[in-house]
């Protein structure tokens, strides 16, 4: 079975959404990341205030843990 990580990426554990390997320093595997709405991807990619970044990541994980589709994610923090 082929890995869904980027070529040259080092696996850093499973994707929290689909459990396939994901690259180091990535929130999701490439396949799951591409399912997110563009606005959610931009919000999760923002750098700056660490507390707000953690809040955005928490929203992503809460959404996944609630079993909601990735395409429905809205980041508010």
Image: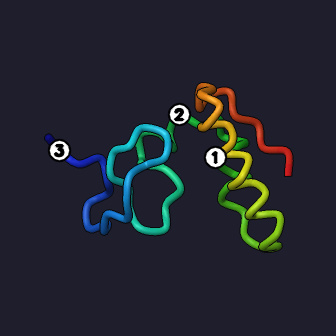
Q: Quadrant of residue 53?
A: bottom right
Residue at the extreme front = 65
What residue does disc 3 label?
Answer: 2
Q: Earlier in the sequence, mark 2 or mark 3?
A: 3
Distance from Cα at disc 2 to Cα at disc 3: 19 Å
Does residue 53 sit above or below 3 in this rendering? below
Q: From the viewer's perspective, is 31 left or right of 56?
A: left
Q: From the viewer's perspective, is 8 left or right of 2?
A: right
**Percent position of residue 9, x then y:** 31, 66
Q: From the viewer's perspective, is 32 left or right of 11?
A: right
Tell me which residue sits at (72%, 42%) in the image. 39
The label nearer to you, 3 versus 1, is 1
The label nearer to you, 1 versus 2, is 1
- Secondary structure beneath dot 1 equals helix
What residue does disc 1 label?
Answer: 61
Image quadrant holding the N terminus, namely top left
Q: Earlier in the sequence, mark 3 or mark 1?
A: 3
In this view, the residue in front, 18 or 73, is 18
Distance from Cα at disc 3 to Cα at disc 1: 25 Å
Does residue 48 sit above or below 64 in this rendering? below
What residue does disc 2 label?
Answer: 35
**Percent position of residue 13, x then y:** 37, 59
In this view, the residue in front, 55 or 34, is 55
Tell me which residue sits at (49%, 50%) in the image. 28
Distance from Cα at disc 1 to Cα at disc 2: 15 Å
**Percent position of residue 63, x then y:** 67, 37
Q: Earlier in the sequence, mark 1 or mark 2?
A: 2
- Secondary structure beneath dot 3 equals loop
């Amino acid at each position: 079975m082929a890995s869904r990580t980027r070529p040259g990426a080092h696996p850093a554990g499973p994707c929290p959404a689909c459990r396939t390997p994901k690259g180091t320093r990535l929130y999701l595997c490439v396949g799951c990341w591409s399912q997110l709405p563009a606005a959610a991807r931009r919000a999760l990619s923002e750098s700056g205030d660490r507390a707000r970044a953690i809040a955005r990541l928490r929203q992503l994980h809460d959404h996944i843990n609630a079993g909601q589709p990735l395409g429905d994610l809205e980041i508010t923090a």
